[in-house]
Image (cartoon, rainbow, N blue to C red):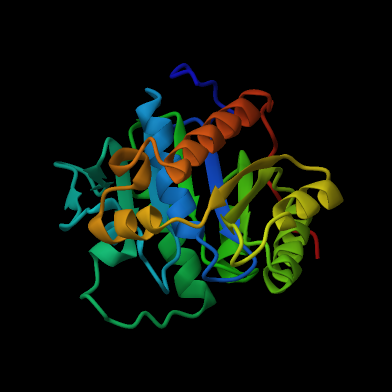
Amino acid sequence: LTAKVKSSLPVGNEIGGDVRNVIAVTSGKGGVGKSTTAVNLAVALAESGAKVGILDADVYGPNVPVMMGCKGSPMRVPGSDKIMPLEAHGVKTMSVGFMVEDGQAIMWRGPMLHRALEQFLKDVEWGELDYLVVDMPPGTGDAQISLAQLVPLTGAVVVTTPQEVSLTDVRRAMGMAEQVKCPVLGVVENMTGDIFGHGGGEQIATTFNVNLLGSIPLEAVARVAGDSGIPVVLSHPESETGKAFFEIAGKVAAAVATRQATALPTLEV
Protein backbone atom coordinates (compact mmCIF):
# COMPACT_ATOMS: atom_id res chain seq x y z
CA LEU A 1 0.00 0.00 0.00
CA THR A 2 1.10 3.54 -0.61
CA ALA A 3 -0.12 6.78 0.88
CA LYS A 4 0.57 8.56 -2.41
CA VAL A 5 -2.69 7.95 -4.24
CA LYS A 6 -3.56 9.48 -7.58
CA SER A 7 -7.04 10.77 -8.34
CA SER A 8 -9.44 8.94 -10.63
CA LEU A 9 -12.05 11.72 -10.32
CA PRO A 10 -12.32 14.63 -12.74
CA VAL A 11 -11.65 18.18 -11.56
CA GLY A 12 -14.82 19.87 -10.36
CA ASN A 13 -16.57 16.73 -9.14
CA GLU A 14 -18.32 18.89 -6.50
CA ILE A 15 -17.57 16.69 -3.51
CA GLY A 16 -16.75 18.87 -0.52
CA GLY A 17 -12.96 18.92 -0.27
CA ASP A 18 -10.27 17.25 -2.36
CA VAL A 19 -11.45 13.64 -2.70
CA ARG A 20 -9.37 11.57 -5.09
CA ASN A 21 -11.31 8.29 -5.22
CA VAL A 22 -14.81 7.17 -4.26
CA ILE A 23 -15.30 3.47 -3.53
CA ALA A 24 -18.82 2.09 -3.06
CA VAL A 25 -19.18 -1.01 -0.89
CA THR A 26 -22.38 -2.73 -1.89
CA SER A 27 -24.26 -6.02 -1.76
CA GLY A 28 -27.27 -7.65 -3.33
CA LYS A 29 -28.95 -8.30 0.01
CA GLY A 30 -28.67 -7.35 3.66
CA GLY A 31 -26.95 -9.33 6.37
CA VAL A 32 -23.87 -10.33 4.40
CA GLY A 33 -21.34 -8.15 6.23
CA LYS A 34 -21.31 -5.16 3.90
CA SER A 35 -20.94 -2.55 6.66
CA THR A 36 -18.31 -4.66 8.43
CA THR A 37 -16.37 -4.79 5.16
CA ALA A 38 -16.73 -1.05 4.53
CA VAL A 39 -15.55 -0.11 8.03
CA ASN A 40 -12.56 -2.45 8.05
CA LEU A 41 -11.59 -1.50 4.49
CA ALA A 42 -11.60 2.19 5.45
CA VAL A 43 -9.57 1.66 8.63
CA ALA A 44 -7.10 -0.71 6.95
CA LEU A 45 -6.48 1.86 4.21
CA ALA A 46 -5.95 4.53 6.86
CA GLU A 47 -3.53 2.26 8.69
CA SER A 48 -1.48 2.13 5.49
CA GLY A 49 -0.99 5.89 5.70
CA ALA A 50 -3.73 6.96 3.30
CA LYS A 51 -6.19 9.74 4.08
CA VAL A 52 -9.60 8.11 4.30
CA GLY A 53 -13.22 8.98 4.94
CA ILE A 54 -16.28 6.77 5.27
CA LEU A 55 -19.81 7.84 4.33
CA ASP A 56 -22.65 5.79 5.78
CA ALA A 57 -25.15 5.92 2.92
CA ASP A 58 -27.21 3.07 4.39
CA VAL A 59 -29.70 5.63 5.69
CA TYR A 60 -32.34 3.07 6.69
CA GLY A 61 -29.87 1.09 8.81
CA PRO A 62 -26.94 3.37 9.70
CA ASN A 63 -24.57 1.07 11.60
CA VAL A 64 -21.25 2.76 10.87
CA PRO A 65 -21.30 4.99 14.00
CA VAL A 66 -21.59 1.93 16.26
CA MET A 67 -18.96 -0.06 14.35
CA MET A 68 -16.56 2.91 14.39
CA GLY A 69 -17.26 3.74 18.04
CA CYS A 70 -18.07 7.25 16.89
CA LYS A 71 -20.53 9.43 18.80
CA GLY A 72 -21.45 13.09 18.69
CA SER A 73 -23.03 15.67 16.41
CA PRO A 74 -21.24 17.12 13.38
CA MET A 75 -20.48 20.85 13.66
CA ARG A 76 -20.62 23.61 11.09
CA VAL A 77 -17.36 24.90 9.67
CA PRO A 78 -16.92 28.43 11.09
CA GLY A 79 -17.99 31.01 8.53
CA SER A 80 -19.33 28.36 6.16
CA ASP A 81 -22.39 26.24 5.47
CA LYS A 82 -20.21 23.13 5.31
CA ILE A 83 -20.39 20.39 7.94
CA MET A 84 -17.30 18.88 9.54
CA PRO A 85 -17.32 15.07 9.67
CA LEU A 86 -16.47 13.35 12.93
CA GLU A 87 -13.29 11.30 13.13
CA ALA A 88 -12.58 7.88 14.58
CA HIS A 89 -9.57 5.58 14.21
CA GLY A 90 -8.00 8.07 11.80
CA VAL A 91 -11.02 7.99 9.46
CA LYS A 92 -13.34 10.93 8.78
CA THR A 93 -16.87 9.66 9.35
CA MET A 94 -20.34 10.89 8.36
CA SER A 95 -23.67 9.16 8.90
CA VAL A 96 -27.33 10.03 9.17
CA GLY A 97 -27.05 8.12 12.43
CA PHE A 98 -25.37 11.19 13.94
CA MET A 99 -28.48 13.26 13.24
CA VAL A 100 -31.33 11.09 14.56
CA GLU A 101 -32.17 9.60 17.93
CA ASP A 102 -31.20 5.99 18.62
CA GLY A 103 -33.93 3.73 17.28
CA GLN A 104 -35.67 6.50 15.34
CA ALA A 105 -37.19 5.19 12.11
CA ILE A 106 -36.07 6.90 8.90
CA MET A 107 -38.82 6.83 6.30
CA TRP A 108 -37.62 8.71 3.25
CA ARG A 109 -38.89 8.42 -0.28
CA GLY A 110 -36.57 8.55 -3.26
CA PRO A 111 -36.29 12.36 -3.71
CA MET A 112 -35.50 12.94 -0.04
CA LEU A 113 -32.93 10.13 -0.07
CA HIS A 114 -31.30 11.66 -3.15
CA ARG A 115 -31.09 15.06 -1.47
CA ALA A 116 -29.59 13.57 1.68
CA LEU A 117 -26.87 11.80 -0.29
CA GLU A 118 -26.19 14.98 -2.22
CA GLN A 119 -25.73 16.90 1.03
CA PHE A 120 -23.45 14.25 2.51
CA LEU A 121 -21.25 14.44 -0.56
CA LYS A 122 -21.27 18.16 -1.33
CA ASP A 123 -22.02 19.90 1.97
CA VAL A 124 -19.56 17.94 4.12
CA GLU A 125 -16.03 19.34 4.33
CA TRP A 126 -14.19 16.09 3.66
CA GLY A 127 -10.87 17.85 3.18
CA GLU A 128 -8.07 16.01 1.41
CA LEU A 129 -8.87 12.31 1.02
CA ASP A 130 -7.20 9.55 -0.93
CA TYR A 131 -10.31 7.38 -0.55
CA LEU A 132 -13.92 8.02 0.37
CA VAL A 133 -15.48 4.64 1.20
CA VAL A 134 -19.28 4.66 0.84
CA ASP A 135 -21.28 2.05 2.74
CA MET A 136 -24.30 1.61 0.47
CA PRO A 137 -27.72 0.23 1.40
CA PRO A 138 -28.21 -3.37 0.27
CA GLY A 139 -30.00 -4.07 -2.99
CA THR A 140 -30.42 -2.15 -6.22
CA GLY A 141 -32.60 0.86 -5.47
CA ASP A 142 -32.78 4.63 -5.24
CA ALA A 143 -29.56 5.10 -3.26
CA GLN A 144 -27.45 3.24 -5.81
CA ILE A 145 -28.95 5.22 -8.69
CA SER A 146 -28.53 8.52 -6.84
CA LEU A 147 -24.87 7.89 -5.98
CA ALA A 148 -24.04 7.04 -9.58
CA GLN A 149 -25.75 10.25 -10.71
CA LEU A 150 -24.10 12.47 -8.11
CA VAL A 151 -20.45 11.49 -8.25
CA PRO A 152 -18.03 9.68 -10.55
CA LEU A 153 -17.34 6.39 -8.82
CA THR A 154 -13.83 4.97 -8.94
CA GLY A 155 -15.31 1.53 -8.46
CA ALA A 156 -17.37 -0.81 -6.33
CA VAL A 157 -16.51 -3.59 -3.90
CA VAL A 158 -19.30 -6.18 -3.93
CA VAL A 159 -19.84 -8.27 -0.79
CA THR A 160 -21.52 -11.68 -0.75
CA THR A 161 -21.74 -14.81 1.34
CA PRO A 162 -21.26 -18.29 -0.15
CA GLN A 163 -24.94 -19.38 -0.12
CA GLU A 164 -26.88 -19.49 -3.36
CA VAL A 165 -29.58 -17.16 -2.00
CA SER A 166 -26.93 -14.46 -1.58
CA LEU A 167 -25.29 -15.21 -4.93
CA THR A 168 -28.62 -14.77 -6.73
CA ASP A 169 -28.98 -11.27 -5.32
CA VAL A 170 -25.36 -10.29 -5.85
CA ARG A 171 -25.74 -11.07 -9.54
CA ARG A 172 -28.34 -8.30 -9.63
CA ALA A 173 -25.93 -5.94 -7.90
CA MET A 174 -23.25 -6.78 -10.46
CA GLY A 175 -25.71 -6.14 -13.25
CA MET A 176 -26.66 -2.76 -11.83
CA ALA A 177 -23.01 -1.74 -11.49
CA GLU A 178 -22.57 -2.53 -15.16
CA GLN A 179 -25.70 -0.57 -16.07
CA VAL A 180 -24.59 2.61 -14.29
CA LYS A 181 -21.07 2.18 -15.67
CA CYS A 182 -19.45 1.68 -12.28
CA PRO A 183 -16.34 -0.52 -12.51
CA VAL A 184 -16.31 -3.43 -10.08
CA LEU A 185 -12.97 -3.51 -8.27
CA GLY A 186 -13.70 -6.99 -7.00
CA VAL A 187 -15.79 -9.35 -4.91
CA VAL A 188 -15.45 -10.13 -1.20
CA GLU A 189 -16.79 -13.43 0.10
CA ASN A 190 -17.77 -13.08 3.76
CA MET A 191 -18.59 -15.75 6.36
CA THR A 192 -16.54 -18.39 4.60
CA GLY A 193 -16.40 -21.75 6.40
CA ASP A 194 -18.19 -24.97 7.22
CA ILE A 195 -21.44 -23.28 8.31
CA PHE A 196 -22.19 -21.25 5.19
CA GLY A 197 -19.87 -22.97 2.73
CA HIS A 198 -17.27 -21.45 0.47
CA GLY A 199 -16.52 -20.75 -3.18
CA GLY A 200 -19.51 -18.55 -3.99
CA GLY A 201 -17.42 -15.41 -4.26
CA GLU A 202 -14.98 -17.09 -6.62
CA GLN A 203 -17.91 -18.27 -8.72
CA ILE A 204 -19.26 -14.72 -9.04
CA ALA A 205 -15.80 -13.32 -9.77
CA THR A 206 -15.27 -15.88 -12.54
CA THR A 207 -18.71 -15.34 -14.05
CA PHE A 208 -18.28 -11.57 -14.25
CA ASN A 209 -14.53 -11.60 -14.94
CA VAL A 210 -13.60 -9.53 -11.89
CA ASN A 211 -11.13 -10.03 -9.05
CA LEU A 212 -11.86 -12.09 -5.96
CA LEU A 213 -10.46 -9.66 -3.41
CA GLY A 214 -10.56 -12.14 -0.56
CA SER A 215 -12.55 -14.47 1.66
CA ILE A 216 -13.41 -13.51 5.24
CA PRO A 217 -13.73 -16.45 7.65
CA LEU A 218 -16.64 -16.70 10.07
CA GLU A 219 -15.00 -15.75 13.37
CA ALA A 220 -16.46 -14.39 16.60
CA VAL A 221 -13.84 -11.62 16.73
CA ALA A 222 -15.61 -9.79 13.90
CA ARG A 223 -18.86 -9.58 15.88
CA VAL A 224 -17.08 -8.58 19.09
CA ALA A 225 -15.13 -5.89 17.25
CA GLY A 226 -18.23 -4.50 15.56
CA ASP A 227 -20.13 -4.27 18.84
CA SER A 228 -17.21 -2.67 20.67
CA GLY A 229 -16.64 0.08 18.12
CA ILE A 230 -13.07 -1.02 17.45
CA PRO A 231 -12.79 -2.56 13.96
CA VAL A 232 -11.20 -6.00 13.87
CA VAL A 233 -8.19 -4.73 11.90
CA LEU A 234 -7.32 -2.74 15.05
CA SER A 235 -8.63 -4.97 17.82
CA HIS A 236 -7.42 -8.29 16.39
CA PRO A 237 -5.03 -7.50 13.50
CA GLU A 238 -3.36 -10.92 13.74
CA SER A 239 -6.64 -12.86 13.54
CA GLU A 240 -7.52 -14.57 10.28
CA THR A 241 -10.30 -12.01 9.81
CA GLY A 242 -7.98 -9.08 10.47
CA LYS A 243 -5.32 -10.38 8.10
CA ALA A 244 -7.94 -11.02 5.40
CA PHE A 245 -9.21 -7.43 5.60
CA PHE A 246 -5.67 -6.03 5.34
CA GLU A 247 -5.11 -8.20 2.27
CA ILE A 248 -8.37 -6.99 0.74
CA ALA A 249 -7.41 -3.35 1.41
CA GLY A 250 -4.11 -3.91 -0.38
CA LYS A 251 -5.86 -5.40 -3.40
CA VAL A 252 -8.40 -2.57 -3.48
CA ALA A 253 -5.59 0.01 -3.39
CA ALA A 254 -3.83 -1.82 -6.22
CA ALA A 255 -7.03 -1.97 -8.28
CA VAL A 256 -7.63 1.75 -7.78
CA ALA A 257 -4.04 2.51 -8.76
CA THR A 258 -4.53 0.81 -12.13
CA ARG A 259 -7.61 2.81 -12.99
CA GLN A 260 -7.41 5.90 -15.14
CA ALA A 261 -9.79 8.84 -14.81
CA THR A 262 -13.34 7.87 -15.77
CA ALA A 263 -16.23 9.91 -17.02
CA LEU A 264 -19.28 10.55 -14.85
CA PRO A 265 -21.36 7.37 -14.74
CA THR A 266 -24.71 7.73 -16.46
CA LEU A 267 -27.74 5.53 -16.09
CA GLU A 268 -28.95 3.98 -19.31
CA VAL A 269 -32.64 3.15 -19.24
- Which residue: 71% across, 43% down? 183
User: Which of 62 and 216 lies nearest the eye of the viewer?
Assistant: 216
Q: Residue 115 lies in what quarter of the image?
A: bottom left
- Residue 153 in sight here: yes
Q: Position of residue 253 (x, y in %)?
A: 56, 29
Q: Residue 143 lies in what quarter of the image?
A: bottom right
Number of labels in the image equals 0
Q: Where is residue 30 in the image (x, y as percent from the top left)?
A: 54, 71
Judge whether 79 appears above or below 30 on screen: above
Is 68 placed left or right of 18 in the picture?
A: left
- Which residue: 61% across, 38% down? 154
Q: Position of residue 32 (x, y in %)?
A: 55, 65
Is 197 placed left or right of 17 in the picture?
A: right
Q: Position of residue 67 (x, y in %)?
A: 31, 56
User: Which of 167 and 96 lies nearest the eye of the viewer?
Assistant: 167
Q: Residue 18 lies in what quarter of the image?
A: top left
Judge whether 21 appears above or below 31 on screen: above
Q: Which residue lies furthest to the front in this view?
A: 194
Is 73 placed left or right of 48 in the picture?
A: left
Q: In which quarter of the image is the C terminus?
A: bottom right
- Which residue: 45% across, 73% down? 112
- Residue 264 in sight here: no
